[in-house]
Amino acid sequence: MKKLISFIVTALFVFALPAGICFAADEGAAQTSPSPNLIVDSYSVSDKSIQTGDSFTLNFKLKNTSRQFEIKNILIHLSGGETFIPDGATDTLYTGSIAAGGSKSFSKNFYCSGGTDGGRYPISLSATFEYSADGGMVQGNAESNMSISVAKTPASEPKSVSLTPQLLITEFSYGGETIQGADTFDLNFKIKNNSTDITVRNIIIKMNGGETFVVADGTDTISVDSISKNSTVSLSKSFKCMNAAPSGIYPITASISYEYFDSEKTAGSAELTMSIPVIQPDKVQFEGIALAEQNVTVNTESDCAFQIINNGQTKLSNGTVKLIDENGGVLASAFIGNIEPGTQFSSNYNLPVTFSQTGIKRLKLVFEYENENMEKKSIEQEFSVTVEEYNDPYANLTENTEQQTQTKETSVIPIIIGCVAGAVAIAAAVIIIKKAVKKRKAKKGSDLFDEEI
């Protein structure tokens, strides 16, 4: 009986074990799917013979191994250690997605560090990505290595030590010989990499014209990817000259930063200056010429008063003013010195002149000076003056006074004569009367014979 029971238990165990194992395997198969992964499907380099100091491009293709999941948001990091350095940019690449079972190609520039011996060196790849599973986003990552061959430098051609690359301006132009205030011009210039064996990269040029020149288009920065060894790049930037800038020579500075590889990544800089001459036009004129279209008296000194206005941006130096007659003769002259921008000179009896003959005189006022470029210049103004004989304004008044005096004298004489005649007549009458009285008294026998009459 015990043997029978033991046989039945053993039989049940034997038959039940495979069934349990199969069920567990089927349940795991139903619940688990292969996770997606990224692998390097293929890769190559642009130069099959890479030597120390060389730059090259790594081309590679990544494949999504999953045929069920699309992977997204893929961020790739590349590292070549101390042997291969990313050239001119970061070590990172990005792509939005790779379809299930699909592939995508990438490329990255590298520089082989100086002093690297011949052999094979790795460039490692690490990537992070996401994929959708079970209603959510799942994070994934992948890693791979690519082996790059570096050729051995021939013993007969030892690698020389490179000099530091320098950038310099070889030539520049600005559309003419000079710039005037308010002008807009294109500054064209060439920058050369004087190194014979090193390429400079990631060049940033910041332009600065100080207070005289401002950038007329866009920003003040120019970017250049690279300048090969012993090569030149042509650049241009538009500037505007400030209207109030005095004449002179002013700088435009190019502040340059760049990178290069010489056993390691190195930063360099340069400060380059271009000198631009600014010539402001002279703006000067006469005002208030006192003798213009006036009448003056012959042989009488008159002052030719005037004003000179400097309404430009330049200083006028060593000024001399002359008054010239119609035959070119100098009637008067004076040294008036310097006139600053935005000011004026007012004369104070600087040009006294006397005309010896009457008539209309054609005259010319000339101002000679030197501008800030030491150029001798002049301006002139023509005008006329009428010279007349002296005319006494009181002459008519004197004649009238004399005539009135003579008239009064003529009219007084008859009056005086009349008065004298009247007086004589009166005196005669008195005498006659007295004689008559005397006779009358004598007839009466008067004793007064000696009475005075």
Image (cartoon, rainbow, N blue to C red):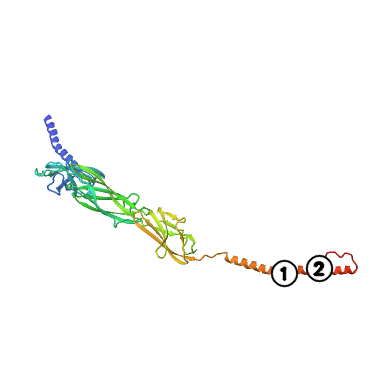
Where in the figure is residue 300, as x and y percent of width and height?
A: 49, 61
Q: What secondary structure is found at the residue carrying circle 2?
A: helix
- Which sits earlier in the primary sequence, circle 1 or circle 2? 1
Where in the figure is residue 345, as x and y percent of width and height?
A: 43, 55
Q: What secondary structure is found at the residue carrying circle 1?
A: helix
In three-dimensional space, the C-alpha distance between marks 1 and 2, rounded to whole angstroms, equals: 21 Å
Q: Which residue is mark 2?
A: 431
Marker count (numbered): 2
Please state which amino acid type lies under the numbered disc 2. Answer: Ile
Of residues 61 and 338, which is closer to you in this image?
Answer: 338
Which quadrant is home to the C terminus?
bottom right
- Give residue 51's quadrant in the image: top left
Label 2 neighbour load within 10 Å: few <14, some 14-19, many 20+: few
> Above or below — where is 378 with respect to 194?
below
- Give residue 351's quadrant in the image: bottom left
Please state which amino acid type lies under the numbered disc 1. Answer: Ile
Q: Residue at x 84, y 69 (%)?
A: 435
Indicate which label's residue lies in the foreground, 1 or 2.
Answer: 2
Of residues 175 and 409, which is closer to you in this image?
Answer: 409
Which dot marks residue 440? none
Q: Residue at x 63, y 68 (%)?
A: 403
Residue 266 makes an appearance in the image = yes
> Above or below — where is 141 with respect to 370?
above
Where in the figure is residue 49, as x and y percent of width and height?
A: 12, 47
Residue 95 makes an appearance in the image = no
Q: Which residue is mark 1?
A: 417
Question: Is 388 positioned to the left or the right of 265 in the image?
Answer: right
Where in the figure is residue 149, as x and y percent of width and height?
A: 12, 44
Of residues 149 and 295, which is closer to you in this image?
Answer: 295
Q: Residue furthest right?
A: 444
Label 1 neighbour load within 10 Å: few <14, some 14-19, many 20+: few
Question: Is 159 positioned to the left or the right of 91 in the image?
Answer: left
